[in-house]
Image (cartoon, rainbow, N blue to C red):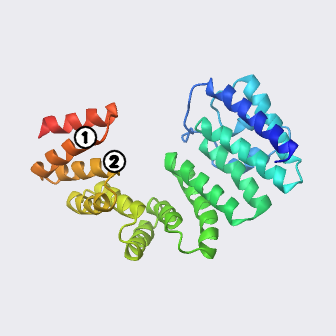
Amino acid sequence: MKKSQIIILVIGIAVIGILYSLPRVVVDNEEGNAEIGEQATSSSGSSVEELHDAPVSEEAREALDAIAGKLQGESDKERFLVLADTLALIYSQVGKFDSAAYFLEQAALQIGSPETWEKAGNAYYEAYTFALNEEKVAYLADKTRSYLNKVLESNPNRLDLKTKVAMTYVSSANPMQGITMLREILEEDPSNEDGLFNMGVLSMQSGQYKRASERFEELVRFHPDHLQGQFYLAVSYFESKQNNKAKRQFQQVQDMTDDPMVLASVESYLEKL
């Protein structure tokens, strides 16, 4: 690793330490402009902090601005990538996922490799999963598809990426396109973990609990350690009035985890049975 890269990483680690002292936040999806890129590039003197309204200490802001300033003027692609990755890591550490995605997108635009496309697409998908505002959901979903589809064009066997693309369509004006893609994934790989889980969740959301239980039964048959799948299977049994199965399934979930929130939810359901 070059000396300049080591210095950049040291700065990044220092900033992460500063940010860890702040309250942890998730992207504020109810306020702000979805056009993140326009905010970040509107003027060379604008602060990186403007990407979000969440409070950042003066010390952290100055450090972030310093790295962003280096990024803006960096012509060496290797150093540019390190700077962008550092900023993305810092922002993801404090839950500012759309800011993290923005900087990874800058690397993708500068480098133009499948690896950078995938990192940008995955980051935008993570931001998409937290978004609540409809405009921002649509914006982040579109960004996710634009980069992950680039990877899929050269490697269509990446079913993990295809699943993410499918899920962005589910919340769009054409949800059946996403459901069709998930079905295609399961036709190709009947044991696909993400495909089975997401189809089960979609069945629950539409109130088809019997169908959901069938999806989750398949999921835990192939992936018995999938705690969420085991829990949702129990809930699906409960909602579809399969009480004996629900009780046994909730008891199985109890044996799988020490998570107090999960156990509290299980106890709540068991009290109703």
Horizontal side of 45 relative to 170 (left or right) equals: right
In the rendered image of this protein, does residue 120 appear above or below residue 30?
below
Q: Specify whether 162 is left or right of 231.
A: right
Q: CA distance from mark 2 to mark 1?
A: 11 Å
As helix, strand or loop, the secondary structure at mark 1 comes to: helix
Name the image quarter holding residue 87.
top right
Q: Nearer the viewer, residue 50 or 61?
A: 61
Q: Name the residue at 51% across, 67% down.
A: 162
Q: Quadrant of residue 23?
A: top right
* Residue 35, visible in the rendered structure: no
Sooner in the amino-acid sequence: mark 2 or mark 1 = 2
Q: Secondary structure at mark 2?
A: helix
In the picture, the disc for residue 120 is none
Query: Quarter-wise, where is residue 55 in the image?
Result: top right
Q: How many marks?
A: 2
Q: Amino acid at mark 2?
A: Leu
Q: Is residue 200 left or right of residue 13?
A: left
Q: Residue furthest front?
A: 1
Foreground of the two, 106 or 131: 106
Q: Which residue is denoted by mark 1 in the rendering?
A: 255
Residue bearing the label numbered 2: 227
Residue 116: x percent and y percent?
70, 59
